[in-house]
Amino acid sequence: MKHRNIAAILISVAIMAAGALGGYFFRPGITGNDAMTSIYSPAGQRTEITLPDNSKVILNSKTTLKYSAGFSRDNRQILLDGEAYFDVRKGAIPFEVKTEAVNIRVLGTAFNLKCYSDEPLVEATLVRGSMVVEKLDNHSEVIEEIKLKPNQKVTLLKGVVPSEAEEEVQVTEKEVVSQVIAGQPEQSQSLRLVESYDTQKSTGWINGLLVIEGETLENLSKKIERRYDVSIVFMSEKLKGFKYTGTLREYSLEQVMKALEATSPIRYSIDKNRVFIGENQEEINKYLKVMN
């Protein structure tokens, strides 16, 4: 697999005090005195590992996975910040993945989970088997849960829920469509179940696909930053609200930016590891009129 790195190089083991894991990484069942194995997948890379119970995991860029010395013996608990695809080996001990916003519980299954601490959207997609997604409150208590069947997905916006204008947008292969939609945040939040879902949309990154589903340019920029190990600088705040849908295959950074420029009124420039995105003054006003 292209951009795969050697996981063993990235594994570090340390004895951590209870507070050292910080915030959401401290959970009952994994004590602060356990030896923790930490694996980090850097920006621009994907990392494939085999856990002590022979479960397989692929980590997306800028993802951290941790587990204790008692994994596979006393527990099968994983701590995750980022995105990972899990192919879980069946066992007597339930397999759990814990994040800042949700917990996942399975026995033997395959699923994709995305929960970056610096992004509002959480996504859990079931490929096969079954799993339970638990929503947590600010005190890490379970306040809601949904059991998934294969080809279903659960989403959660941390802190807000999307308006009707931000409902799921179907992806069309070989096409990038941009639009401006102003979503209004609400005060409550809940797990949102997508009953029939093409799991390739969530797992395409494993094969190098950049799948975009009605995402704002601001959110899309985070994917681009992780994938190409760059920093994106917006020269205009209004551009952050543009939305895109499409699929790009193993393209270079230059090709991705050209595709975005061709489908919306933006201009870009690349200077070493920074990408500057500004307005195309000739096109932006008539573009906004058409979209409104």
Image (cartoon, rainbow, N blue to C red):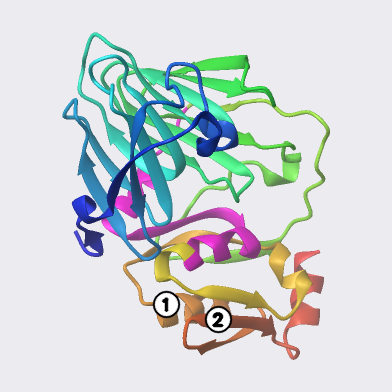
* Residue 268 included in the magenta stretch of the image: no
User: Mark 2 touching mark 1, by CB under 8 A?
Assistant: yes
Residue 199 seen anywhere in this rendered image of the structure: no
Local SS, label 1: helix
Quadrant housing the C terminus: bottom right
Residue 38 seen anywhere in this rendered image of the structure: yes
Could you say which disc has been placed on residue 189 in the image? Answer: none
Tell me where residue 45 appears, x and y as whole percent.
Answer: 32, 61
In the image, taking residue 69 as reference, residue 257 lies left or right, namely right
Answer few, some or many: residues within 10 Å of disc 2's Cα (few below 14, many 20 plus, some between 14 and 19): many
Tell me where residue 158 appears, x and y as whole percent.
Answer: 67, 37
Residue 56 in which image quadrant: top left
Start-end of magenta stretch: 196-225
In the image, taking residue 122 as reference, residue 114 lies left or right, namely left
Residue drawn at (50%, 24%), measured in percent from left and top?
A: 103
Local SS, label 2: strand
Q: Which residue is mark 2?
A: 275
Residue drawn at (72%, 71%), measured in percent from left and top?
A: 239
In the image, taking residue 241 as reference, residue 259 lies left or right, namely left
In the image, taking residue 103 as reference, residue 3 lies left or right, namely left
The residue mark sitting in front, 2 or 1, is 2
Q: Say what amino acid the circle numbered 1 marks.
A: Leu
Residue 106 in which image quadrant: top left
Q: Which residue is mark 1?
A: 253
Q: Say what amino acid the circle numbered 2 marks.
A: Val
Name the N-terminal-most of marks 2 and 1.
Answer: 1
How far apart are the two marked residues, 2 and 1, measured between alpha carbons? Answer: 9 Å
Residue 260 higher or lower than 163, as above or below:
below
